[in-house]
Amino acid sequence: MWRFRALAGVLLLLSSNSWAENVLYRAQQPVELGAARTEVALRSSDSAGKGGLSAWKGPRPLALALSGIWAREAPAAGYQLYLNLPPSVQPDAADPGYLGDVSFYGAPDHFDTRRPKKVAFLLDEALERLRKAGRLAAQPTLTLIPVAIGEQGRQPRIEAVSIVETPH
């Protein structure tokens, strides 16, 4: 039940404009997706603390937040998301860094600043799996893998990627 409350809290956090102080990591620019693997380096804020994600001991769970999901023409398939996936590792849903999938279904054909499409993934279990596998880096990397390469739309894009602390 607490996971549902935390996820609901993240969605409320994303729907407001008052969550900037809760951001621990963020991408420096929007993410343009295509038919190939996309790597996104997430840079820490002052809130991440010393040692970064690998030393995180905050009182609240963390979530990966994607905001401003759009495409001129939505891809027929989505993208799998992985945290700290090494370049030499073949992506697989059994990987400790696998977070889930993101779809462009229902995404607008332009970036709508008033009602951007958003999605969040709770990270507590993935962080524990990565810690056990020895892959919890201080500076995290998000990898997006297209599910069906031949089914790409036009200019799929995510305006903001961040790791945020969930509200109580």
Image (spheres, helix red, strand yellow):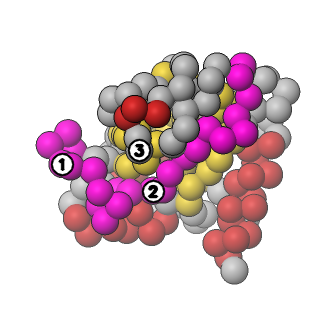
Whether label 2 touches label 3, CB < 8 Å: no
Percent from the top left, x then y, of residue 7? Answer: 68, 62
- In the image: residue 100, left or right of residue 9: left
Residue position for label 2 = 99
Residue at the spot 21% in from the left edge and 44% down from the top edge: 86
Amino acid carrying mark 2 in the image: Leu
Q: Is residue 102 magenta?
A: yes
Percent from the top left, x then y, of residue 91? Answer: 27, 50
Instruction: Tell me the CA gap for discs 1 and 2.
Output: 15 Å
Amino acid carrying mark 1 in the image: Val
Instruction: Tell me the CA gap for discs 1 and 3.
Output: 16 Å
163 is higher (above) or lower (below) than 126: above
Amino acid carrying mark 3 in the image: Val
Quarter of the rendering containing residue 87: top left
Percent from the top left, x then y, of residue 139? Answer: 35, 40
What residue span does the magenta drawing correspond to? Answer: 86-110
Residue position for label 1 = 89
Residue at the spot 70% in from the left edge and 34% down from the top edge: 107
Q: Residue 147 carries which label?
A: 3
